[in-house]
Structures are given as C-alpha cells and as structure tokens.
Amino acid sequence: MGSLKNRKLVIQAILKSQKRDPNSSTIELNINSENKLNTIPKTELSNILYDLECKEWVIRTVSRSSLTSKKKSDFTITILQDLQNWYSAYLLRIKRKLQNLPPKTINKLSELSGAINESFQKRNSTELWVYTDRNHAECLEFLHDQSVLSDYTNTGDPDINPTYTIRATLNVDNFIKFDSQIKKFIQKQSTRKENISDSQKMSPSPKASNNQILYKISFPLSKEIKLNNKVLAKPQYDSENFKVFSYLMENPNKTIKKSKIQESIGKSIGKDFHKIIENLGFKKDLRKIFFIVSKDTIFFRNPVTKVEFDKFGIPRLKITKK
C-alpha cells in the first residue's frame, strides 16, 4: 500500500493537477521534484497507484509508461470519484485505531462483538442478524473499516426507533482476530484499574469527611457490576437486567419512570424493579443505600457519600474483594 507519507504525496499531487482543470475527470501528472514524486521508489509508487485503483476505486491509471521508463515523463489518470472527500475519510479511517478510541466506544465495541459472536454461534452462518441501537453506529463503521463486517444494512430506521437490527456479512478470520484484540485490550485496562484500586484503601476511614465517597458502583468494560472492587453480578449481555442497569448507570441520581427506560431500550420490562435489582446483587442494606424503588419509578444513588450513608443509621459495609 505504501507509506502514509508517500501516499499523501501522491494524493496531493493528483489534487494539485486536478485544480488546473477542475471540470475534467482526466489529468496529466508529472513525476518531478516539485511534487516530490521523484522521491518515491518506482515499485512503491506503482503499488500506491494500484491500491487507489483496484482497492479504493478512486482512480483509473490510463498510462503507466512513466513507471517503467527511465525518463520521468507524464502519465494519465482518470478520477472516478470525489478525491478530496475520499482522502478526508481515509485519514479518519486510519486514525481509528483501538487504542485511540474513547472508553465509551470501546465499551460499545465490546457489546457489539458479543452480540456478533452470539448471532454467529446460533446461526452457524456468516450472514448475521444482530440486535443493536443507534449508539453503535460508530462501532459498525469501525468494524466495517477493519473488514470485520461487510454489506451491513439496517432493517429499521435508527432516527425513529433507537433500537433496531442489522443484517451483515461476517469475515470470520478478521472477527476472530478483532475479538481477541479487544478482549486483550479490555483485560489490560481492567487490570490497570484494579491495580490502582488495590493501592487505595478499601475500607473508609472513620474520620472521613462528609463529602468523601464511601461506596461506588461501576460497570467496567468487563461488564461486571462492582461495588468499589467487589463483583456483585455479571448480567447476561442483552438481557433485561443488562439493559435496565446499563440505562441506570448512564442516568444516576434522578427519579426515572419505567416508561422512559422502556422507550430507551426499545422493549417492555417484564419484571418489576424490585426483582431486577435483587437479581443484580442489591439486597438488604445494599438495596437500601443505592436504590429507591416503586412500582413505576426507580432512583439509583451513585456514588454514596459519607453524609448520605450516615442518614441510614446502619453499620459500614464489609467489602471483601471477590
């Protein structure tokens, strides 16, 4: 494919030549010191032009005489699409490396990867049907860029319904490679967070200030519900418990109606809130300090400060790392 630096030189040289006659789709291009194409080895230049033509479908090279001739003369190129727009998209694409993505996108990629694997195992086919939502749009583009998915289409309208199903073709080899990569990345991140937590005191000081956080629920990339660093539960991906709790984690410290959660997750909630939070490990005192629940509403308090905890009049929680 050629180095990014040399590919950039080729694209810029083509764009500059096109400006001379913007109404024509065919251009004459010189290999010279002005555009610095003479600094690119002939084999690499040939490979770059081949990729632009046969893999990216943005140009067609009419004449390659300049690449085989000792004389660096002109050669002719036909431009097949908006080269500037393609190049902007290409630069964005190559920057989208896993380690450069924000944690929220990594989280969504992990969820989507799990859904893809589940669909593949059930159907035993590379033609997939995957339940998702519009928050995964960027992840779908990323997987497409990584050649994990191809020919994916939405079976619903994401602008109308926040949840919908995609139909896609899976490249199994690329998916296995990607799935392994993201699991290793998540494990590395989780280990780093645990090491930081281990270096801190798990039990709050009796002299803690009123605003000090005593207890905090997290839902890290491993998708385990944790109290400080103790695992409470690991809900099954895409289950009712998983969807409800994911919504609560994004909307803490406010009273939320059941209908609002149902609208967001795109399905009705079968179990009552009492049963859901019990399934997720919030029982007795844990339930008391983190949740206020009624038939139609739920309030998720997170984190819990010393002044808030002292109002309950109960002993400090014993937290043992699991």
Image (tube, grey):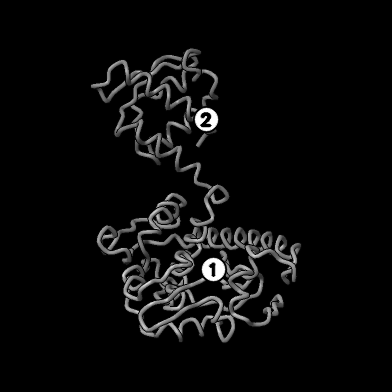
Residue 65 horizontal side relative to residue 198, left or right: left
Q: Nearer the viewer, residue 159 or 63?
A: 159
Residue corresponding to mark 2: 44
- Alpha-carbon neighbours of circle 2 within 10 Å: few (<14), some, or many (≥20)? some
> Where in the figure is residue 27, as x and y percent of width and height?
32, 21
Please say if 159 is above or below 119.
above
Judged left or right of residue 117, residue 269 is: left
Q: Secondary structure at mark 1?
A: loop
Tell me residue 54's x, y (percent).
38, 39
In this rendering, the answer to whether 1 lies above or below 239 is: above
Residue named by callout 1: 302
Q: Earlier in the sequence, mark 1 or mark 2?
A: 2
**Residue located at (47% from left, 73% from top):** 237
Q: Nearer the viewer, mark 1 or mark 2?
A: 1
- Residue 242, given in percent of the width and then of the height, sits at 46, 74
Residue flagged by tag 1: what amino acid is it? Asn
Between the C-alphas of marks 1 and 2, the distance is: 56 Å
In the rendered structure, the answer to whether residue 313 lies left or right of residue 143 reads right
Q: Which amino acid type corresponds to the residue marked 2 in the rendered image?
A: Glu
* Viewer-closest of 164 and 47: 164
- To which quarter of the image does residue 124 belong? bottom left
Quarter of the rendering occupied by the C terminus:
bottom right
Q: Residue 78: x and y, percent?
A: 30, 27
